[in-house]
Amino acid sequence: MKTLQEIIDESSKIVFFGGAGVSTESGIPDFRSEDGLYRQKYTVSPETMLSRGWFFSHTEEFFTFYREKMLPLEAKPNAAHKKLAELEEKGKLLAVVTQNIDGLHQKAGSKNVFELHGSIHRNHCLSCGKSYTAEEIAASVGVPKCSCGGIIKPDVVLYGERLDEDTVSGAVRSIASADTLIVAGTSLTVYPAASYVGFFRGKHLVLINRSTTLLDRKCELVLHGKVGEILSEIKV
C-alpha cells in the first residue's frame, strides 16, 4: 500500500481499466469466478442467451434472462467507484475505462468514463430510435415495445456485436497518454477489451485483482485483494 500511495502521489494522468471485479463489492456477481454468472447451470448457456443471434431469434427468452441477471438497479457505488471519482475531481485521474455495463462509475460521480461494453441505462427502439431507461425495461413485460411498436434493445454489446468505435478510440487514446495505468477487477480474458492494456506506454503499471492474471509478471506492482478495500486506503 505504501508503494501504491507513492505511485498515486507522483502521478497526474492516471487511467483506471476495470472489469466485473470492481462491482462485486456492490453486490453484482462477476462472470468467471467460482460463483460467477457463467458457472451457474442453465439449459442454454449465458453466452448464448447474451448473443446477438439469440436476441433476434429468442427475444422474449433474452429479456427474461436479461431482467433477472443483468439489471442490478438496486446496486450502489462502492469504495472503488467513489475513490476513482475523487481522484478525477482532484485532477489525478484522466479516465475510467470499464468493461462493466452497470453505470456505477457515473453514479459515483465519475465524468470521463469509456464503457467498452455499453450500458444498461441506455436503451433504444430499433425502429424509430426513441430512448428508454433501464427502469422502464425492468418494469416491462415480455418483449419491451416502443410507443411506435418497435422492439427496444439495450445498448449493451452482445456476443457477435462489435464494440463502439468512438468508445474504443477514446479508451485507447487515454491509456496511451497515461503516466499510470491501474488494471483492476478483471481476469483479462475478454477480448478485444483486454488487448487495449497493450497501448500503455507510461511509467507505472499496477494490477489489483483477487486472483492472478497473465499480466502480473509485467506489472510494477501487483496487489491481490478486493478493489474497493485497497483503493479506499488511498489518500488523495
Image (cartoon, rainbow, N blue to C red):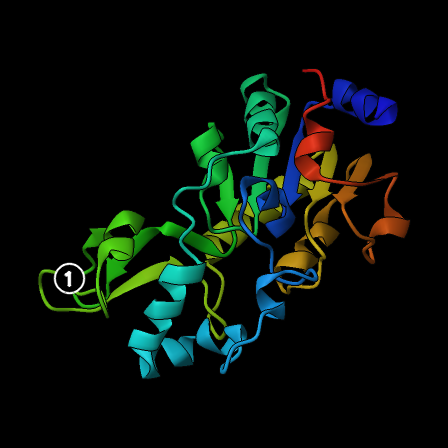
| Of residues 45 and 133, the one drawn nearer to the viewer in this rendering | 45
Q: Tell me the crowding category of disc 1: few under 14, some 14 to 19, or many 20 or more residues within 10 angstroms, Cα based.
A: some
Give the labeled residue for mark 1.
146
Q: Position of residue 16 (x, y in %)?
A: 65, 38
Q: Position of residue 133 (x, y in %)?
A: 27, 48
Mark 1 lies on a secondary structure that is loop
Q: Position of residue 23 (x, y in %)?
A: 57, 44
Above or below 19: residue 222: above
Does the rendering let one see residue 10?
yes
Q: Is 70 left, or right, of 230 in this rendering?
A: left
Residue at the (49%, 81%) spot, across then down: 44
Quadrant for the N terminus, please.
Answer: top right
Residue at the (33%, 84%) spot, across then down: 57
Q: Tell me which corner region of the image, top left, top right, bottom left or bottom right, holds residue 66.
A: bottom left
**Which amino acid, by three-letter code, is at mark 1?**
Cys
Above or below 106: residue 99: below
Quadrant for the C terminus, please.
Answer: top right
Q: Tell me which corner region of the image, top left, top right, bottom left or bottom right, holds residue 127.
A: bottom left
Q: Is 124 left, or right, of 199 in this rendering?
A: left
> How many numbered tags mark residues here?
1
| Of residues 132 and 179, the one drawn nearer to the viewer in this rendering | 132
Q: Position of residue 110 (x, y in %)?
A: 49, 30
